Image (spheres, helix red, strand yellow):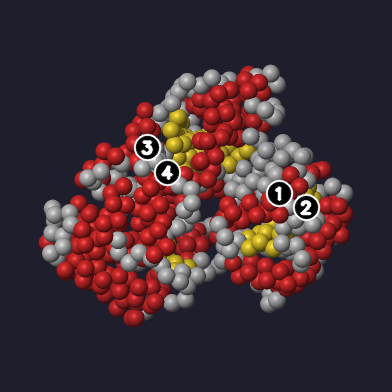
Amino acid sequence: MTDDFAPQGALAKAITGFKPRESQRLMAEAIEQAIDKKQPLVVEAGTGTGKTYAYLVPALRSKRKVIISTGSKALQDQLYARDLPKVAAALDYQGQVALLKGRSNYLCLERMEQQLAGGVNIAPETLAELSGVRNWSSQTVDGDVANCSGIAEDSPVWPLVTSTNDNCLGGDCPLYKDCFVVKARRKAMDADIIVVNHHLFLADMVVKEGGFGELIPTGDVMIFDEAHQMPDIASQYFGQQLTSRQLMDLARDMTLAYRTDVRDMAQLQKSADRLTFCTQDFRLVLGEPGFRGNLRDVLAQPALQRALLLLDDALELCHDVAKLALGRSALLDAAFERAALYRARLKRLKNVQEPGFSYWYECNARHFVLALTPLSVSTRFREVMSEKEGTWIFTSATLSVNDRLEHFTRRIGLDDAKTLLLPSPFDYATQALLCVPRFLPEPNQRGAAVQLARMLAPVIIANQGRCFFLCTSHQMMRDLAAEFRASLTLPVLLQGETGKRQLLQQFVTAGNALLVATNSFWEGVDVRGDTLSCVIIDKLPFTAPDDPLLKARTEDCQLRGGDPFAEVQIPEAVIALKQGVGRLIRDSDDRGVLIICDQRLVTRPYGQIFLNSLPPAPRTRSLQCAIDFLQRR
């Protein structure tokens, strides 16, 4: 297998531009040994290692059934459509490969027909898109909504014509034999290599779905790319959630059943309307949008207790009315089961005294989420691994803190795993410069955005844009964008004004743009060459101290006699910072400056932990040195 990575090996012969890298070969060798010994393995492979090829080659050579899970659907599509075919062709691999996504990514023919027959309160523009979906449905082979051109991925039509774990009719569906999810799963069952994503993998571990059994077949080898996301995603699935979208979908389906299958039961419409009203009313009582708060605190408020009681009554009414018509409509039968499920979740969420969980809520302008999240997933994840025999491999460019992997292995319950740290092959000593400017405003200081924008404008102008400004809050992002748009003649792009993919395309096409962004641009974004040669980060990405999940985890750490700041807050901030820093140097020919606008890197003792965890680039406090470095390009 290691010969595949040699200068005249299979990869070099078949893949244009392939360059042998020692770290890539070492990673592939470690994965081959882990598969042979059925031993769990954790690998941090620095940016540029080529970790995708490093795990694909031993996976394909192993002649075992392999599940590969990625951190996002975009990476999943890239792996399946680009990287996997290249490596398979280079190795002359004869096995079958399959792509499998969650059911909400596939068109549901039954739900589409239901909407066409008796759509509920559908806006005219959505109705036009529904007609477009119907035309596409007769042409598509796999039903993957990502392949439907002309309709945006965030269009309101998609939730109407796709199913979820809650509302899927399973084997009772009249169009079961034509179901795209069933076809995708059958293909996966017969495949040797199956590409999934973390959300689907974890949902499948937790939910044993009626009518389908498990979506993902059992594998001999499980490989998790972008594994740093796994603990947080696992905590979502090992907890419980009830959302306004679920409740509104239930009300919509009951109305659909009344308009199509059970037209003699006007009570269905009345109970659905009441659930809709109570859900909307509960959202209003929760208060200001854009906030994540402690559910324990708000449930103590009399107004919220009353709104919650009315919501529970509305769910009970839906349950009782649907029960009267059981057997008359598959859609209504499923609605009956969901009403019972949501009542049970609501009861579970109201029991806020159970230790070991964080109880929180989140709301935007129209929707809310009520959730409980376990403070630790290590025990549960260890149980799942013991139930699924085989080799478990976790890899990412950002798993270590201060060159140690214990933070990740402890959170995921991998105490007995073999670990490997592989540095990036990039020459950061000549390719990059790290600048922590002098005279920075204090974090959260009033007017900090204006001060930062004025300080950094000369660097951005000297670099002719080509810059990401990554922020730790939406407010800072908006304030900075407004200030830059008032003072710069360069294009200033702002996250949220259009989709992520379109925004990235605009940035690359412009060639001289400044992109001001937050969360979603800190990772999973790959811009190579001169198009991006400066990354600025507004401050160290510590989680907000009032975040209820963080509060609960710090309290739990204190009860165990630990140091919450050292054991929880610093490691999470280090990994988040490493993700943002990783946007800068993406290739051996890239060159650029990283500016972190936080004095704490040099004034606080813990700043050294952050610096030790970053790539070994030269450092400066002078913005003029940063400008000189950029202009020497």
- Residue type at tag 2: Val
What's the distance in space between the residues labelled 2 and 1, CA to CA?
8 Å
Q: Nearer the viewer, residue 542 or 304?
A: 304
Q: Residue at x 25, y 49 (%)?
A: 169
Q: Nearer the viewer, residue 120 or 422?
A: 120
Residue beneath disc 3:
184
Residue beneath disc 1:
584
Q: Closer to the N terminus: mark 2 or mark 1? A: 1
Q: Residue at x 51, y 41 (%)?
A: 77
Q: Relative to 148, say whether 545 is above or below.
A: below
Q: Relative to 215, say whether 578 is above or below.
A: below
Q: Which mark is residue 344?
A: none
Is there a contact, CB below 8 Å, between mark 2 and mark 1? yes
Is there a contact, CB below 8 Å, between mark 4 and mark 3? no
Q: Where residue 242 sits in the image (x, y, percent)?
A: 35, 62
Visible in this render: residue 29? yes
Q: Which mark is residue 593?
A: 2
Q: Is residue 584 left or right of residue 87?
A: right
What's the distance in space between the residues labelled 1 and 4, CA to CA?
33 Å
Residue beneath disc 4:
144
Is there a contact, CB below 8 Å, between mark 4 and mark 2? no
Crowd class of label 1 (few under 14; some 14 to 19; many from 20; radius 10 Å): many
The N terminus sits in image quarter: top right
Q: Closer to the N terminus: mark 2 or mark 3? A: 3
